[in-house]
Image (spheres, rainbow, N blue to C red):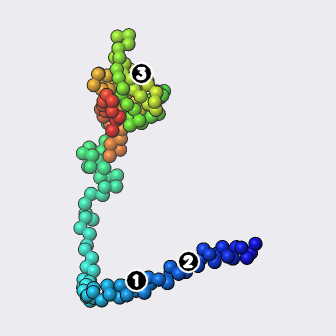
Amino acid sequence: MRAMAGLLLAGLLGPLGACMDSGQQDVHEWMVQQRSRVPVRPAERVTIRPYQPEPYQGAGGIDPFGAASAPMVAGQSGRRSASADALLVQERARAREMLESYPLEAMTLVGTMAQEGQVVALVRVEGLIHAVRVGHHLGQNYGRVQHISEAGLTLREVVQDPAGAWVSRPVTLHMGEKSK
């Protein structure tokens, strides 16, 4: 059995050994010839200038992360308005609706219909269609539906501005596209 395996191994490796030696000299001669054709140029010297540090000029400017500068950035006086605070208290006091657990970016307005004399928006969230009326709440920013039309759905969200004050802003969810 061992003799048979030895013969088989010799039969397979014998031709490979013959292939390895032939052609090596030709390749070596070709490489020498190619190297002699390429002129060798010395590398150019690169001069490195010494480092000159620049002094920081913005030290006297507005600190973008400081609390004192936030009202200036937002263009406000720094006082919180009583109406915005009342709106936030009102929004936090009520029971949350199911569609408030999803961001507006996950919602698509797919249609509208009239039901009992009211316009109803059809909103798709995670493959399910939900009927939404004026006064319902959507999204994670205390969004309340203000108006529904064939072109889209307009809602009012309550968000914090850069100064930290709570403000309301209008958002429109257009037909067939997700909110941005």
The answer to whether 78 appears left or right of 22 in the picture is left
Residue in front for this viewpoint, 121 or 88: 121
Residue name at image x 69 percent, y 76 percent: 6
**The quarter of the displayed image where residue 30 is located:** bottom left
Q: Secondary structure at mark 2?
A: helix
Read off the residue under disc 2.
15
Who comes first in sequence, dot 1 or dot 2?
2
How many angstroms separate mark 3 from mark 1 (CA)?
78 Å
Q: Type of residue at label 2? A: Pro
| Position of residue 119 measured from the top left corner of the image (x, y, whole percent) | 34, 17
Q: Secondary structure at mark 1?
A: helix
Residue occupying image coordinates x 27% and y 25%? 151
- The residue closer to the viewer here, 38 or 136, is 38
Could one spot residue 90 in this view of the protein? no
Residues at discs 2 and 3 in contact (Cβ within 8 Å): no
Numbered tag placed on residue 10 in the rendering: none
Task: Indicate which disc residue 131 carries.
Answer: 3
- Secondary element under disc 3, as helix, strand or loop, is strand
Q: Which amino acid type is shown beneath numbered disc 1? A: Val
Q: Quadrant of the N terminus?
A: bottom right
Residue 108 vertical placement versus 5 (above, below)? above
Q: Give the residue displayed 25% in from the left and 79% down from the top.
A: 52
- How many angstroms separate mark 1 from mark 2 (CA)? 20 Å
- Residue position for label 1: 27
